[in-house]
Image: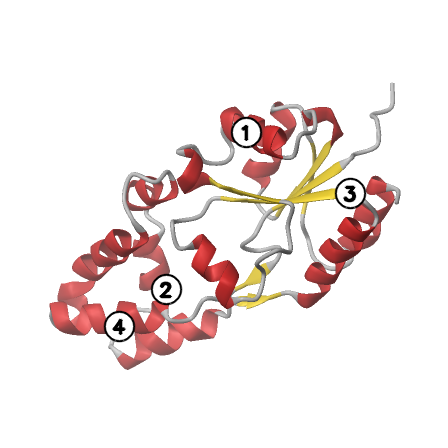
Amino acid sequence: MARERAKALLLDFDGVLRRWDPAVAADVEREYGLSEGVLTEIAMQWGRLRPVLTGQVSHADWVSSVADALAEPAGGPDRARAAVEQWQRYRGEVDNEVLDFVREVRAAGISVGLGTNATDLLDADLAALGLVGEFDVVVNSSTLGVHKPAPEYFQAACQALATPPARVLFVDDEDWAVRGARAAGLSAHRWGGHADLRYLRAALDY
């Protein structure tokens, strides 16, 4: 039996709506004599990342832990803190074509939620990027205390959207998140770029 048409869209943030220029981190690493890719490698270590994504520690504490781990290769704690602070000042860039799509979907009467594994800096990031008010709901893992791809995350997102899972279309650039959403009963599409917008418009059928 064919699925019912989606009545709500749940959209990932990083990798879909927000893009990161890898040159920013690379420039910082070169300036401070760090090995290529080490900032992201240390910051994304799961044992360090999971607590900040589930609200157990703050974004500031997470950033401090990254600086601590970089103290030796950076040539001391002061240089490590300076490098990490310089890296963190860059908060990414909005993909305006995706933002236009979000606005188009909402104008058609379809609810749109931002569904992201994020830190407690998310609200500030949304404000800095001019995205306040662009979504009907924002579902932040650090506020919920649970992250994608846990079923509890998707249950909470659907409740926030006031829409049953079978009527929610989820879009993410990570396969593990897409698989988690499907296991929780949502329709889900792995984002591959702007060419996917045509498919998403057809799936939402507005």
Dot 2 amino acid type = Gly
Q: For residue 28, which quarter of the picture? A: bottom left
CA distance separating discs 1 and 4: 37 Å
Instruction: Identify the element where label 1 is drawn.
Output: helix
- Mark 4 neighbour class, 10 Å CA radius: few under 14, some 14 to 19, many 20 or more: many
| Furthest-top residue in this view | 1
Quadrant position of the N terminus in the picture: top right
Q: Residue at x 31, y 62 (%)?
A: 38
Question: Could you give the CA–CA distance between mark 2 and mark 4, rounded to whole angstroms?
Answer: 13 Å
Name the N-terminal-most of marks 3 and 4: 4
Q: Nearer the viewer, residue 77 or 176?
A: 77
| Residue matched to label 2 | 37
Residue at x-position 57% and y-position 30%: 154
Helix, strand or loop under label 4:
helix
Is residue 18 visible in this depiction of the protein? yes
Q: Check disc 3 and report the residue beneath it.
A: 110
**Residue pointed to by mark 1:** 156
Q: Compared to 156, does 202 lie above or below?
A: below
Task: Calculate the distance from the C-alpha at mark 1 to the C-alpha at mark 3.
Answer: 18 Å
Circle 3: element type: loop
Relative to 148, does residue 126 appear above or below in the rendering? below
- Quadrant that contains the C terminus: top right
The image position of residue 95, as x and y in percent, is 64, 65
How many other residues sit within 10 Å of disc 3, few (<14), some (14-19) or many (≥20)?
A: some
Does residue 78 appear to the left or right of 32 in the view shown?
left
User: Tags 3 and 2 in contact by the CB under 8 Å rule?
Assistant: no
Residue that label 4 marks: 83
